[in-house]
Every structure is written in C-alpha cells, then in structure tokens.
Amino acid sequence: MATGWPMKTTYANGDVYSASDVNDITGTINLLGSSVAYTAGKNKIINGNFNIWQRGTTFTPSSTGYFYTADRWVSYCYSASTNTVSQQAFTVGTAPATPYESQYFIRVNSTNTLNLLEQRIEDVRNFANQNVTISFWAKSASAQTITIYLSQVFGSGGSAGVDTSSTKAITTSWARYSVTLTMPSISGKTIGTGSYLANTFTGAINNALDIWGVQVEQGSTATAFQTATGTIQGELAACQRYYFRKSIINGGATKTVFGQGWAFSANGADILVPLPVPMRTTPTAIEYSALGDFYVEGASIFSALTAITVDTNISNSWITNASVTKTGAFTSGGTYVLLAQSTSNAYLGWSAEL
C-alpha cells in the first residue's frame, strides 16, 4: 500500500493523479485528454471568473485616472464619464464550456479612447525568465484586435518597467483565446516597494469588450481554466487581501455594527474593525457610502459625523479603524459603537491595493 502525502492513483491510461488534481468545485478528478487539467495555484489571476464585486457592479468615473471595478481588476479613465465598466450576467445555459457554468462576466467600454482592463499580480519576481501563457474567453460588440500585455513593474524606487505583448483578433461570439509570452529575466534589476506583474488588455475605442475566465500560468500551453484558489471562499479571501468592504448584513440597517472603540478626545473616537484576512499591507485609504449613513452610540448618541478617516498609528494588516469626528460630541475615554443610520446603503471599505 502506498504511503505518504499526497496519495497518488494510477489510471488505466497510465496517468498518475494526486490530491492537488481534484476539482475543488465538483470533487472529481480533473482530466483533460491524457493530461492533468488542474494544478493548485497554477493561475496567478485572482477573480478570473469575475464572481466577486465588493465595490459595486457598474462604474463610470467622473475624473481621470485608474479605478477599480470587479475585485482585483482595474481600468483607466482617460476623460471624465467616458468609461463604463459593468458586471454582466450570462443567460443560463450560454456561458462558455467549462467545468462549471459561471454567473458573470465583465464588460469594458470607452467612448473616448482605448478600453483598458488590468490585474496587478503581486511581486515582479513571478514568471521572470519563463514562458507564460495568458488565456481568456472574449467577445466584442464588433470585431476588433486587442493587445494583451504582461508588464514587469518594479515598484517605487525600482528599475524601469518592461512590457511584453501580443495581439488577438476578437470576434462577436464567445471564444477562448491564448497567447504565450517569454518574460525577461530580472537579473541586475532593482525591486522597489509594491512591485507587480501587470496583465493588461487594451481594445478599440467605442467598442464594448466582454471578457471572462482569465488565466495566467507558467508554460506554453493553455490548460483548463481554474480560479486562483479553486474555492468560492478562498477566492473571496484572496480578494480581501487587497480590498475589504463591510456592508449592511441582510438588510440589517440600524442593527449592523461596523465596529467598537473609544473616544480619544471630546472631538473624536477610534472605532476598531477586525479584518477577515490579513491584508497585503496596513490599509491607508478608507471609503464610505456617506457620512449621513452612520451614527455613534455610547456615552452619548448622535449622527451627523464630520469625517471618517484611518488612523494608521493604531492599524495594521489584521485590524484597522475608522476614526470618526464631531466637535464636542464625545466623552473622552468613553466607549462607542459605530452603526448604520436607518439605511441599507451604509458601507466602509479599506484598500491595500498595489
């Protein structure tokens, strides 16, 4: 009897499979012809099936610059209100053929300049001096040629970035495409703070581009699509390493507690919020729905906060805070709780994105 882990099984065709070859979704052995279709962690793209949308489902930015859309995916606005990125739902039974039927895909459209969709894979060391295959399903409102980049970005204080790219002609029907790129060596380069590998898709102006099932893996062959973690919860946790949004639970409105803390003066309190997973770094940015969506309860009860910020002095990658302020409203040293103010829209979000 075989001993050790992982346990291995030999099939009639001679293939040998271990525990890592098990499909996390169906629980069956993954077969693709006579080769192994699944390897744990092979896909470096997180949320490649666009199942997680913590920030919302439609994005039309009012100012220029990069903006996040579906979790881990960033786009670029070249001119205010000319870019729209949105969640789209597959009609049941029409999703691309995969081991499971996906629910959503992403649509990117710009009426001003090129469409852009990008994911930043943490650490530029990934795939250095290796062949890398990028595969994805796509369709377009009208036929177009898109460019697929894999760019080495060496971070703050690091060497100049290096782009590697290829093109693909996209049709108006769903199809799977793949390109294989040879990544440069990083020998002699300086790696700074926040380095990453950027997988970027750029498409034509005013021509909606739909994408699903993005995979970036080592080697020269596109294997069967698998999410980065292989599980629903694992994929959410991987996303929350970079962004976490705490929202109303089941329409709880005033029943939802966002955190608890203490007043540091008569003018404000630090409300501590435990994070579900350790984030990439201490989050320095906080988002919130609206000041009027919250109220504070403790030694006194009040709403109409004047600000919500992050105090990085008492935050780390495991626990963060929402510093809430209102002149003369607090009892210094008193305990306070931050709650939703009779609305289902309240949320707080923390970012540790690249």
Image (tube, rainbow, N blue to C red):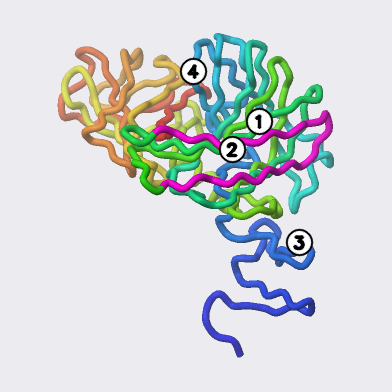
Whichever of callouts 1 and 4 sits on the residue coming sooner in the sequence is: 4
Q: Residues within 10 Å of mark 2 (few under 14, many from 20)?
A: many
Q: Is residue 19 left or right of residue 139?
A: left
Say which residue label 3 marks: 32
- x then y, percent, for residue 11: 75, 78
Does the stretch in magenta take in 274? no
- x then y, percent, for residue 195: 40, 39
Q: Quadrant of residue 140?
A: top right
Image quarter of the N terminus: bottom right
Q: Quadrant of residue 320?
A: top left
Residue closer to the observer: 352 or 177: 177
Say which residue label 2 marks: 52
Q: Start and end of the magenta stretch? A: 160-186
Question: Please, what secondary structure does the residue beneath circle 3 have?
Answer: strand
Question: Please, what secondary structure does the residue beneath circle 2 have?
Answer: loop
* Amino acid on which the number 1 mark rests in the picture: Thr
Farthest residue to the bottom: give it. Answer: 1
Say which residue label 4 marks: 65
* Amino acid on which the number 3 mark rests in the picture: Leu
Whichever of callouts 2 and 4 sits on the residue coming sooner in the sequence is: 2
Residue closer to the observer: 204 or 242: 204
